[in-house]
């Protein structure tokens, strides 16, 4: 299994531009999570999906952030317009509620976003 | 609101030492607890998952324990090696399908 795949790995953009981060969860996993990591606040949940349906988006900081999961193998996190304070590492994770690794979350390598 | 604390924030030990990393959480009503390792500039690697009904889990030189009633978990690393140098993160899940709430981590340095 390839694990959770994220793209791009690095993104540098200018303030005001639209940014789209992508995630492919582990095949067969029914939960997908988006986290953000900063030095000041550590790792925080932004939103998570169950069977492609958003369950809790209370961590999404502002209306500038949106996330979609059109199918079981793909999710996007979009920031429009981006601001310098959005600079962080964004992680995608997935988990399954079946089998030996019940509810264990597996993380992707992250996307390091820099907004100038 | 659940809060997770990890002490110490940083730890430096000589190679070969056995060591313990601590994690505490304020709300004992957790579903499970997960320990991760994060190398600089990298993602998180899951080390051990302890379900709320379990007391401990072991993987190789790692042993994690869980005491829900006192809101504590420990990660024991035996015979530490320089390759163990990384940041170790503890996280708890409040519900069966909920998100992980993370501590700030313990940065471990194992000196050869």
Image: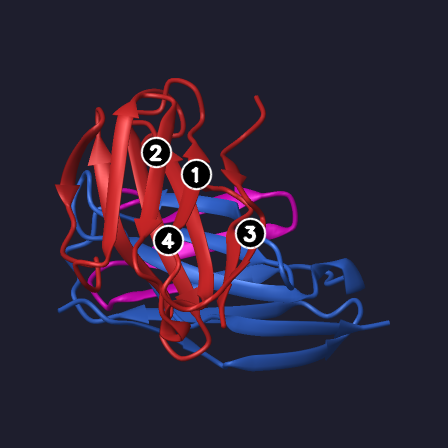
Chain colours: A red, B blue
> Cα distance, mark 4 to mark 1?
13 Å
**Residue corresponding to mark 3:** B43
**Spot occupied by residue A46 in the image (x, y as percentages of width and height):** 26, 55
> Which residue does the image show at 41% across and 74% down from the upper left?
A84
Element class at badge 1: strand
**Residue corresponding to mark 2:** A75
In the drawing, does residue B78 fall left or right of residue B63? right
> Cα distance, mark 1 to mark 2?
6 Å
**Residue corresponding to mark 1:** A22
**Residue corresponding to mark 4:** A18
Disc 1 sits on a residue from what chain? A
* Front residue of A42 and A59: A59
Element class at badge 3: loop
**Spot occupied by residue B34 in the image (x, y as percentages of width and height):** 39, 50
Q: Residues within 10 Å of mark 3 (few under 14, many from 20)?
A: many
Which numbered disc flags the more N-terminal residue, 2 or 4? 4
> Cα distance, mark 2 to mark 4?
16 Å
State the extent of the magenta-drawn residues as a range: B51-73
**Tag 1–tag 2 contact (CB < 8 Å):** yes
**Tag 1–tag 3 contact (CB < 8 Å):** no
State the image quarter where residue A83 is shown: bottom left
Foreground mark, 1 or 3, reads 1
- Is label 1 on the same chain as label 3? no
In the drawing, does residue B92 fall left or right of residue B31? right
* Front residue of B12 and A71: A71
């Amino acid at each position: 299994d390839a694990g959770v795949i994220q793209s791009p790995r690095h993104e540098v953009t200018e303030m005001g531009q639209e940014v789209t981060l992508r995630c492919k969860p582990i095949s067969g996993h029914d939960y997908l999570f988006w986290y953000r990591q900063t030095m000041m606040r550590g790792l925080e949940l932004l939103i998570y999906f169950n069977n492609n349906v958003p369950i809790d988006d209370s961590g999404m900081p502002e209306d500038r952030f949106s996330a979609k999961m059109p199918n079981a193998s793909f999710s996007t996190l979009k920031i429009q317009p981006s601001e310098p304070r959005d600079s962080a590492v964004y992680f995608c994770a997935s988990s399954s509620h079946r089998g030996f690794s019940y509810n264990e979350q597996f993380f992707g390598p992250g996307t390091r976003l820099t907004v100038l | 609101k659940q809060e997770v604390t990890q002490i110490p924030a940083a730890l430096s030990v000589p190679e070969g030492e056995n060591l313990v990393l601590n994690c505490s959480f304020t709300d004992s009503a957790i579903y499970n607890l997960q320990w991760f390792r994060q190398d600089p500039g990298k993602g998180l690697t899951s080390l051990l998952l302890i379900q709320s009904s379990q007391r401990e889990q072991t993987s190789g030189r790692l042993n994690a324990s869980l005491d829900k009633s006192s809101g504590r978990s420990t990660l024991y690393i035996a015979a530490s090696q320089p390759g163990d140098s990384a940041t170790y993160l503890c996280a708890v899940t409040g519900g069966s399908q909920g998100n992980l709430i993370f501590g700030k981590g313990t940065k471990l340095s194992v000196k050869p």
